[in-house]
Image (cartoon, rainbow, N blue to C red):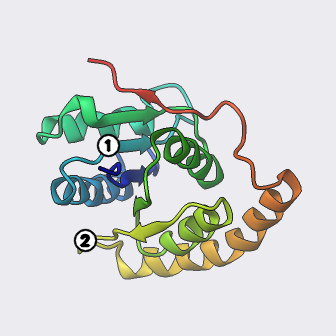
Amino acid sequence: MSPPPLIVIFGAAVRRDGRPSSALLRRIGHGLDAARTHPESPVLCSGGALRAGPTEASIMAQVLADRGVAKARLILDERSLSTLDNVAAATAQVTFGGHPYVVACSDAYHLPRIRLLLAVHGVRSRPWPGRDQAPWGHGAAMGLREALAIPHNLARVMLRGRRPAPSYGPTPAKD
């Protein structure tokens, strides 16, 4: 029997008071839907902290656990600070676990860049944007940002080579 796909929830901002932003809550919701659809799949919660306080990954894990996802399924990547880092952590976990593909959970505007970067690293993926999307104005602005981020990220990957950045290996969730 082959391993199940790896569900990856890509991080978003945490508010200064430690609460998840609406973008992070949307992405957690997508991950929860994917986890219910793929009950055997591990879930990589990916995202560090840009300032003191909880990491994006720890907030994801807590919300998922509170909503019934077994902690044994959760893998935390609390070191990633960018989409490039998230992809490196996902690539490392796919390699480690032998997963056939990644179920990428994020906002629709973010998924093309994620999937392109995963493909550059030789990782197959399927998008999981869910039904709950970013408000139109926010999505349009972020779409423009993504259009600029794609060539920037590709240039960084080409300079670094296809290998994932070192030290971004995920760790199992703690009880």
Check disc 2 and give the amino acid type. Answer: Asp
x and y percentages locating residue 16 in the rendered image? 44, 37
Q: What number is the disc on residue 8?
A: none
Could you say which is closer to the camera, residue 22 or residue 44?
A: 44
Image check: 134 left or right of 118?
left
Residue 15 placement: quadrant: top left
Q: Is residue 42 above or below residue 134?
A: above
The local crowd at label 1, few if under 14, some if 14 to 19, many if 20 or more residues have their Cα within 10 Å, is many
As helix, strand or loop, the secondary structure at mark 2 comes to loop
* Residue 119 appears in the rendering: yes
Identified at 60% across, 42% down, the residue is 81
Q: Which mark is on residue 42? A: 1
In the image, residue 99 above or below residue 112: above
Q: Nearer the viewer, residue 50 or 65?
A: 65
On the image, the x and y values in percent for residue 111 come to: 48, 70
Gap in angstroms between the C-alphas marked 2 and 1: 22 Å
* Labels 2 and 1 touching (C-beta < 8 A): no
2 vs 1, front mark? 1
Which of marks 1 and 2 precedes in the sequence? 1
- Label 1 residue SS: loop
Q: Position of residue 42 (x, y in %)?
A: 32, 43
Badge number at residue 132: 2
Percent from the top left, x then y, of residue 136? 38, 82
Q: Which residue is drawn at the image coordinates 41% and 37% (left, top)?
A: 57
Q: Residue at x 88, y 56 (%)?
A: 159
Q: Quadrant of residue 67?
A: top left
**Disc 1 residue type (three-letter):** Pro
